[in-house]
Image (cartoon, helix red, strand yellow):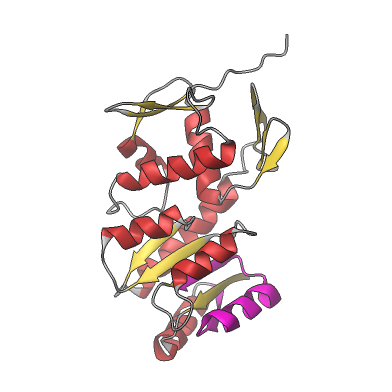
Amino acid sequence: MTKVLLIDDDKKHSELLQAYFKRFGITLICAFEAQEGFRKLRREDPDLLLLDVMLPGKDGFEICREIRKTSNLPIIMLTARGDVIDRVSGLELGADDYVGKPFEPRELVARVQATLRRAESTGSTAGKMDFEGLSIDTESRAVTVDGKLIDLTSMEYELLLILARRHGRKLSRDDILSELRGIDAAILTRSVDIMISRLRQKLGDSVKPPRFIQTVWGRGYSFIGVPLTDD
């Protein structure tokens, strides 16, 4: 059974969600503050984390930042604050999606299911893509740059695949958002720039000229890695 950890200080709402998620075959484990959340994260090894932004003590942004130092666990941020800046901040820290409160429980379940499908599907196509300095193994989801293994979140990994599989094509921000299944379409296309920036940093591609991802001014982005042949 799928296990999801929810860190939210609203106990009554958490208990209602717990009962609702059970109808969809999802075990919802609840924690009500950061320290308890980290304990249950280690003990329960959940498939996904639902993380409220407004928590007592350490807030959701801090928790997300800390988790991303060591884990690529799918994370969906929850908040009653509707500011686009908050949503973008969550994505910038490595969250996979963002859901605003209040929300319908069925919508949250759908987001969880979509995020889990995305995490699973990123490694579902067998094969390997090799470029000068970059290798993508689509079976193991391993990405290496100059022989060094790079840790990517499921969102970052799929973003890289979207670009690499369309080698040389110019993709607009809207094109990229539409390919990233499950992401909140209401988030400004500015979030794509943030995700690209994070991906570039991890790939060591923030230099000029870039090796892998090129900005097409006024249009979007293009993957320019040099493919390796079997010659």
Between 211 and 26, the one lying in front of the other is 211
Q: Is residue 43 magenta?
A: yes
Q: Is residue 141 magenta?
A: no
As drawn, 171 above or below 73: above
- Residue furthest top in the image: 231
Q: Magenta segment range? A: 25-51
Q: Is residue 124 visible?
A: yes
Q: Position of residue 4 (x, y in %)?
A: 56, 72
Specify whether 71 is left or right of 215. right
Q: Quadrant of residue 176?
A: top left
Image quarter of the C terminus: top right
Q: Position of residue 213 (x, y in %)?
A: 48, 29
Specify whether 134 is left or right of 179. right
As drawn, 117 above or below 79: above
The residue at 53%/41% (across/down) is 201
Image quarter of the N terminus: bottom right
As drawn, 164 above or below 115: above
The residue at 52%/37% (across/down) is 160
- Residue furthest bottom in the image: 12
Between 139 and 89, the one lying in front of the other is 89
Q: Position of residue 86 (x, y in %)?
A: 33, 62
As drawn, 209 above or below 172: above
Q: Is residue 165 visible?
A: no
The residue at 57%/79% (across/down) is 37
Q: Position of residue 138 (x, y in %)?
A: 64, 37
